[in-house]
Amino acid sequence: MRTIALVCGMAAVVFASTVMAYANQPQARPLDVLGWTLLALNVLALAWLPGRAPAVLAATAAATAAFFALGYALALWPAPALVALFSVVAAGRRALGWAGAAFLVAVPAAVLIPAPEADNAAGVALWALIVTAVAQLAEASGARRARAAEAERRAAEAERTREEEARRRAQEERLRVARELHDVTSHTVSVIALHAAVAAEAVARAGGPPEAAEALRVIRASSRQALTEMKAVLGVLRPPHAPGDGYGDGGGGEPRSPSPGCAQLPGLLGAAGLPVTLDVEGEPRTLPPAADLTVYRVVQEALTNTIRHAAATRARVTLTYETGAVTVRVDDDGKGSRAPRGHGLTGMAERVAAAGGRLDTGDGPGGGFRVAARLPA
C-alpha cells in the first residue's frame, strides 16, 4: 500500500512539474513520446522498492541521465532517482549508493556546464549539493537503523543469557535436591526395609505372634514401595542424560519407574496396615497422567492420616469414573474431625488444585472421616 502511494504521489509530482517547466524553458526539447516514456520508466521503477533498491537506482539514474542528455526541460523528474539513492544507501549498500550519486552528478555536469548559459554551473553545483545531502541523510538513517538493530540483538542476547542462567541454576538445584534425596532418604528407607526383612525372619523362626509378622511385612512392602516411588521422583528431578550419580535412572541406563496411578491402588491398599475395600464405579479408562498420579497420592495420604491419627479399624476407597472427570473418596470409621491431621490435608488440597480439581474433607455421613477429590479427566 505504501509503495502504491509512493508511485502515485511521485507520478503526480514528476509529470506536473515537467509540464509546467516548459512555460519558463521554451528553448528546451519538446516533451515527445521518448520523453514521456522516460518519465514513466522513472516513476514506475519505484514499484520495486525496497526489495530491489539497487536495480531501481540503476533504472532511475539511467532515465534521469537520458533526460539531462536529451535536453528536456529541467523540473522535478530526478526525484525518483533521489528516492532510490536514499533507499540503497540506507540499506547499507554504501559503495553502490555513492557510485550512483557520483553518476547522477557527473552526467548533468558533463551536459550542462559546457553550454553557453552562465547559470548552468550554479545549477549543477546546486544539484550536486542536493544529491550529497540525500546520500548523507541516508547514511544517518542507515546508521540509526544499525544501532537500533544492534541494541535489539544485544537485548535478545542478554535475555537468552538470563534464561540460560536461570535454567542452569534451576537444574543445579534439582540435581542438589536429587542427591540429597538419594544420599539421605533412600539410604534410610533401604535400611528400614532391610531390618524389617531381618526382623520378619526372626519372628518367623521364633514362632512370634502373627500380628508382628504382618506388621513387619507391611513395613517391608511400604519401604520397597517408597524406594520405587523415590526413584520415579529422582527421575523427574534429574534430566534423562545427566551424568550418572547412581540414582534416578540407575546411572547405567536403567529405565525409570513409571509414576504410580490407579492401576497401583490395589497394591497400595494391600500394604495399608488395616483392612481397606476398593469400589470402582463407572467404566474404568486411562486417565491423564496428572489426574492418575493425583488420585493415587490422595488415597495414599488419606490412608496415612487414617492410620496415624484416626484410630480407625477399616477404610473404604471409592473410585468413580464420570464423563470428563474422576472422583475418589476415602472413608474411615475413626475419630473423624476430632483427630489431629497435621499438614497432610493442606498438601493434598494443593496437589488437587494444581491438577485443576477440588478437594472436600470432613466428617463422614456415617461417622469417621471422609476425603473426597474430584478431578477433570
Image (spheres, rainbow, N blue to C red):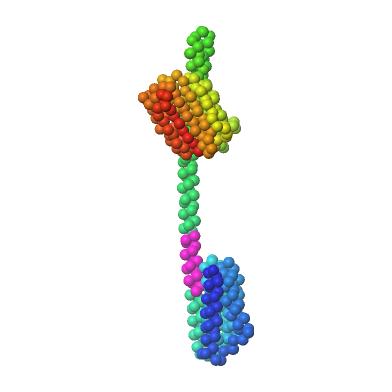
* Percent of width and height locating residue 372: 45, 31
- Residue found at x 48% / y 53%: 156
Residue 146 located within the stretch drawn in magenta: yes
Residue found at the very far left of the displayed protein: 338
Residue found at the very far right of the displayed protein: 34
The overriding secondary structure of the stretch rendered in magenta is helix
Classify the position of the N terminus by image quarter.
Answer: bottom right
Is 328 drawn above or below residue 192 in the view shown? below
Q: Nearer the viewer, residue 148 or 315?
A: 315
- Residue found at x 51% / y 30%: 319
Is 214 drawn above or below residue 48 in the view shown? above
312 with respect to 255 (left or right): left
Start-end of magenta stretch: 134-149
* Percent of width and height locating residue 292: 53, 33
* Percent of width and height locating residue 85: 54, 73
Asked if residue 61 can be seen in this view, the reply is: no
* Percent of width and height locating residue 335: 39, 22
360 with respect to 128 (left or right): left
Residue found at the very far top of the displayed protein: 206
Q: Nearer the viewer, residue 260 or 265?
A: 265
Quadrant for residue 115, please give it. Answer: bottom right
Q: Nearer the viewer, residue 285 or 135?
A: 285
- Residue found at x 40% / y 32%: 346
